[in-house]
Amino acid sequence: MKYCARCGSEYQDSVNACADCPGNPLLVSAEEMRSRGLPLPHELDTRVFVRAGSAEDPFTAEVYTQLLQDANIPVLVRAGRSGVVDKLTTGNVLPWWEIHVPADQQVRATTLIEQERLRELATNDEAAAAAEAEERETESPAAEAEERETESPAVPPPAY
């Protein structure tokens, strides 16, 4: 039998890709499932999931989830706030998402998430610097004078 490493579905040996998961991932053997620490469908899942990081928005949570899945790390994403009452009880009005992974892979997952976070911060800093440079270019006095010349030629006012 073959198994999907994402959803755990069991398939006959003649099938090569999971029909249930997006992107139709390739199926793996039972030995490969065990080597990745994934339970087979008929086995009890005894893994303990622990917090490996958090995300401030759902898009970042999705990026972290895909990053960990690409590294063959099982991941669960949990919203840190579930309703309006949480605003009253926690004082936190902004939502967040917690990224959970199996305890035996926490260090590796935390490292990957932190590397991605640093890469994203560096990219944001570069984008901000480029936007500021572009804004300075368009606001320079020479550029403004040039714009005025191209907008309307110098025409003397009409004489009455």
Image: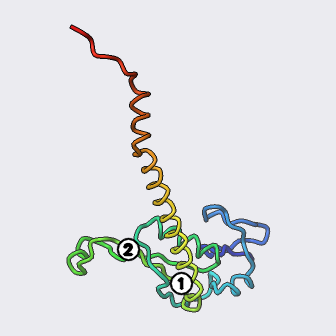
The amino acid sitting under disc 1 is Thr
Q: Quadrant of residue 9?
A: bottom right
Q: Along the horizontal axis of the image, is 83 left or right of 24?
A: left
Label number found at residue 96: 2
User: What residue appears at the point 27 percent right and 76 percent down from the top-left corner?
Assistant: 92
Q: Amino acid at mark 2?
A: Trp
The residue wearing badge 1 is 110
Residue 117: x %, y % from top left: 51, 74
Q: Residue at x 75, y 66 (%)?
A: 15
Residue at 50% in and 56% down: 130
Is 135 above or below relative to 101? above
**Relative height, residue 157 to residue 160 (above, below):** below
Disc tally is: 2
Which residue is nearer to you in this view: 143 or 126? Answer: 143
Q: Mark 1 or 2, which is nearer the eye? A: 1
Q: Bin the neighbour count of mark 1 within 10 Å (Cα to Cα): few under 14, some 14-19, many 20 and up.
A: some
Q: Nearer the viewer, residue 95 or 111?
A: 111
Where 91 sits versus 105, above or below?
Answer: above
Q: Quadrant of the C terminus?
A: top left
Q: Give the spatial CA distance, label 1 vs label 2.
A: 17 Å
Please state the horizontal and vertical placement of residue 49, each as a whole percent of the image. Answer: 50, 87
> Please, which colouring scheme is shown?
rainbow
Quadrant of the snapshot with the N terminus: bottom right
Mark 2 falls on what kind of element?
loop
Q: Which of these two is toward me, 17 or 85? A: 85
Label 1–label 2 contact, CB within 8 A: no
Residue 56 in picture, x, y percent from top left? 40, 71
At label 2, counting other C-alpha atoms closer than 10 Å, the crowd grade (few under 14, some 14-19, many 20 or more) is: some
**Secondary element type, mark 1:** helix
Q: Which percent across, then down, holds residue 84?
A: 24, 71
